[in-house]
Image: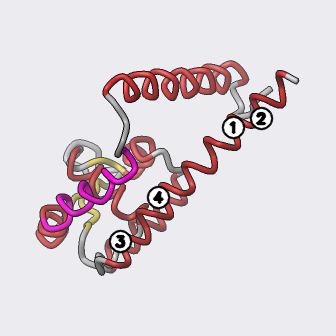
Amino acid sequence: MLKEKYNQYSFILDRTARRVKQYAQSAFSQHNFDLTVDQWTALRTLYENPECTNKELAELCGKDQPTLTRIIDLLIKKNLVARVDHPSDRRCLSLQLTDKGQSKILEIAPKVAEFRMQAWQNLTEEDFAHFTRILNTIYDNLTIKQRDNGDGSYD
């Protein structure tokens, strides 16, 4: 019985996460941003953490490296991101926003913030505090579990 309840919570969490992403992607399309949500996440993260390596950006975005590489390749084709020599390590490259990428961030960030607020309507500060605490606890539980196994698997 208890297991069923936790399975239901996992279902609700997954369903909600999918809906948030679907809503955001739909809004991106309606506003003709010419970006996916994942591309936006990479751009915004790079804006907030200039000149990351691919590995660092993948970790910050919560993506595996091959997936992030595909996202970056598309952003490079759109002339929003460039790969440049790493300032202190000749063996790797850094990623940086182009002028066009900087402009894109400044142009659409306010609109993204506006439509992302739709999900948070009718919630109080107390709701946010509980929600944040619970999600961080779930994340930490799974991060600790993943570290314990050492192979990326879960018990």
Q: Specify start and end residues of the magenta stretch as a single range.
A: 107-120
Q: Name the residue under label 1.
A: 10
- Name which residue type carries label 1: Ser
* CA–CA distance in space, label 3 to label 2: 31 Å
Residue appearing at x 21%, y 45% in the figure = 48
Q: Which quadrant of the structure image shows residue 6?
A: top right
* CA–CA distance in space, label 1 to label 3: 27 Å
Of badges 4 and 1, the one in the foreground is 1
Dots 4, 3 in contact, CB < 8 A: no
Dots 4, 1 in contact, CB < 8 A: no
Q: Is residue 64 magenta?
A: no
Of badges 2 and 4, the one in the foreground is 2
Residue appearing at x 63%, y 51% in the figure = 15
* Residue 28 numbered mark, or none: 3
Dots 1, 3 in contact, CB < 8 A: no
Residue appearing at x 34%, y 46% in the figure = 121
Residue 96 vertical position relative to residue 139 in the rendered view, above or below: below
| In the displayed structure image, the side of residue 154 where residue 84 appears, left or right | left
* CA–CA distance in space, label 2 to label 4: 30 Å
Dots 1, 2 in contact, CB < 8 A: yes
Q: Name the residue under label 2.
A: 7
Per the image, label 2 sits on a secondary structure element best described as helix
| In the displayed structure image, the side of residue 65 where residue 1 appears, left or right | right
Residue 153 vertical position relative to residue 74 in the rendered view, above or below: above
Q: Mark 4 points at which residue?
A: 68
* Sequence-first tag of 3 and 2: 2
* CA–CA distance in space, label 4 to label 3: 19 Å
Residue appearing at x 48%, y 44% in the figure = 62
* CA–CA distance in space, label 1 to label 2: 5 Å
* Sequence-first tag of 4 and 3: 3
